[in-house]
Amino acid sequence: MRLLLVEDNEELAQLLIQRLRAAGYETDLLTTAAEAQAAVATTRYAAMVLDLGLPDGDGLSILREIRQREDPLPVLVLTARGGLQDRVSGLRSGADDYLVKPFAFEELLARLEALLRRPGQLLGRALQIANLAFDTESRQAFIDEKPQLLSARETAVLELLMRRKDRVVSKKLVEDHIFGLSGDVASNAIEVYIHRLRKQLSDRGAKVQIHTIRGVGYLISEEKAA
Ligand code: CA
């Protein structure tokens, strides 16, 4: 299980990393908002521990951007500011929990564990539509309980659609999700991935349909009998 720690205080960061490792969490450390922004767009973490006061900006801006993308990454915010107003604005920006410095490591660990266990969060959650299942921890798709081999991008699209079963997912969100912040995306690239994924699923007997809602996005649902 991999965590992302965004903290510019080196002493605190090293201490946290050591103790998180001892508790069984591999942790990547980043020290600026810009690096963190790029990392969360391209790497999957089980959770992020985010300091708000970063040298190049406010951690809350990262949080807002993640939530705008509808990324469900659990986020525990750390801050030295204890004012009630800051807590409220932090939580409204999409933090799952909040810890004011200084704190005891045991408290951080307890809150982190609570976030990772929270139902509806990322870990070990099985998504299911008809005979198609997706394990969000191993990121493995199954049809009739049989594991399916899909490319990384097909897997990413499938997970995104399955998380929003029966709801339209905008083309823009699919684009951001599979290409991250890398920028240039050919205009038909998403359509190509969707087409490929649709074909793979139907060839392998998944009883689901991926609908294209023209000019809006995509939607996955259980296959309706003709
Ligand atoms: Ca700081």
Image (cartoon, rainbow, N blue to C red):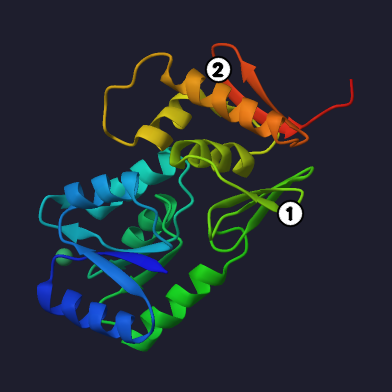
Can residue 84 be seen? no
Q: x, y (%) of residue 130?
A: 79, 42
Q: Is disc 2 in contact with disc 1, using a CB cutoff of under 8 Å? A: no
Residue 145's tag is: 1
Question: Could you tell me the amino acid type at mark 1?
Answer: Glu
Residue at the (53%, 60%) spot, across then down: 137
Q: Quadrant of the C terminus?
A: top right
Q: Residue at x 58, y 30 (%)?
A: 197
Distance from disc 2 to disc 1, alpha carbons, whole Å, reads: 32 Å
Ligand 1 - quadrant of the structure image = bottom left
The amino acid at mark 2 is Val
Mark earlier in primary sequence (2, 1): 1
Q: Quadrant of the N terminus?
A: bottom left
Vertical side of 151 occupied by 81: above or below: below
Say above or below: 164 vs 109.
above
**Which residue is located at x 32 percent, y 87 percent?**
22
In the picture, the disc for residue 216 is 2
Number of other residues with Cα within 10 Å of mark 1, as a class: few under 14, some 14 to 19, many 20 or more: few
Residue 186 horizontal side relative to residue 224, left or right: left
Q: Secondary structure at mark 1?
A: loop
Q: Position of residue 169 (x, y in %)?
A: 56, 29
From this viewpoint, which residue is outermost toward the right?
Answer: 226
| Most foreground residue, 23 or 96 | 23
Please give the count of numbered marks on the rendered protein: 2
Q: Does residue 82 lie above or below 214 as drawn?
A: below
Residue occupying image coordinates x 11% and y 50%: 56
